[in-house]
Amino acid sequence: MSKTTKILIAGFGGQGILFTGKAMAYTGLKVGLEVSWLPSYGPEMRGGTANCSVTLSSEPIGSPIVDKPDVLIAMNLPSLEKYLNETEQGGYIVYDSSLINKECARDGVSIFGIPATKLASDNGLDGLANMIILGKVIKETDVLTLAQIKSSLAQMIPAKKAELLERNIKAMELGYNY
């Protein structure tokens, strides 16, 4: 049986949206899946809108565009509002409840709010809310495993920046165990 998972990561530029997508796509490649990674951001970059479409599949992917995600990662309120009703029935929505203080409800999807920005700040991991949310996504979905992503990060982050690898892994584990 084939399995295709369409993931949409959305928020402001500077929140690590594209890096999160790249980590998922790179991991998908490493474990033998077909992968598409499509970054998209407004002309403003930092502070503007950013989103990233990632498709992981056991068979060839027809289009890199994700308009109806199976998994939505929303890092800000405009992104949650824009894509809440686009998420597929049976899908998952994971959002940063530190930045989105609105009750999120919708039938037919599993919704998880995690105070990622606050957790990052409280644990000396400023700027890594994206990785905390990624950890939560890994825990709640069967898209990829924590071990697979950790292994990929070790290859994505250069050895001379080993402290970044440790911080990213710590952030992911924080989200996974939340």
Image (cartoon, grey):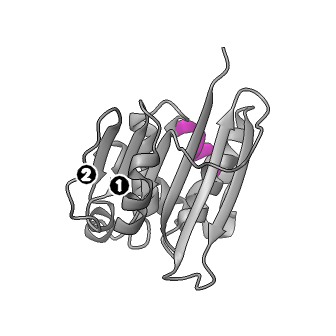
> Which residue is found at the position 52% from the left and 80% from the top?
48
In magenta stretch: residue 152? yes
Query: Can you give x and y, in whole percent of width and height, for residue 149 in the image?
Result: 57, 44
> Which residue is found at the position 48% from the left and 42% from the top?
71
Q: Residues within 10 Å of mark 2 (few under 14, many from 20)?
A: some
Magenta range is: 147-153
Amino acid type assigned to the residue bearing label 1 in the image: Tyr
Label 2: element kind: loop
Q: Is residue 173 visible?
A: no
What is the distance, in whole Å, between disc 2 and disc 1 at their CAs? 9 Å
Query: Can you give x and y, in whole percent of width and height, for residue 126 in the image?
Result: 38, 73
Query: Residue 104 has which mark?
Result: 2
First in sequence: mark 2 or mark 1?
1
Residue closest to the far bottom: 44
> Which residue is found at the position 46% from the left and 47% from the top?
86
**Looking at this view, is 129 or 154 the one in front?**
129
Quadrant holding the N terminus: top right
> Which one is in front in this view, the residue at disc 2 or the one at disc 1?
2
In magenta stretch: residue 71? no
- Up-down relation of residue 35 to residue 155 (above or below): above
Amino acid type assigned to the residue bearing label 2 in the image: Cys
Do callouts 2 and 1 mark residues in contact (Cβ within 8 Å)? yes
> Which residue is found at the position 25% from the left and 51% from the top?
104
Q: Quadrant of residue 87?
A: top left
Q: Is residue 58 visible?
A: yes
Q: Which residue is mark 1?
A: 95
**Looking at this view, is 81 or 25 the one in front?**
81
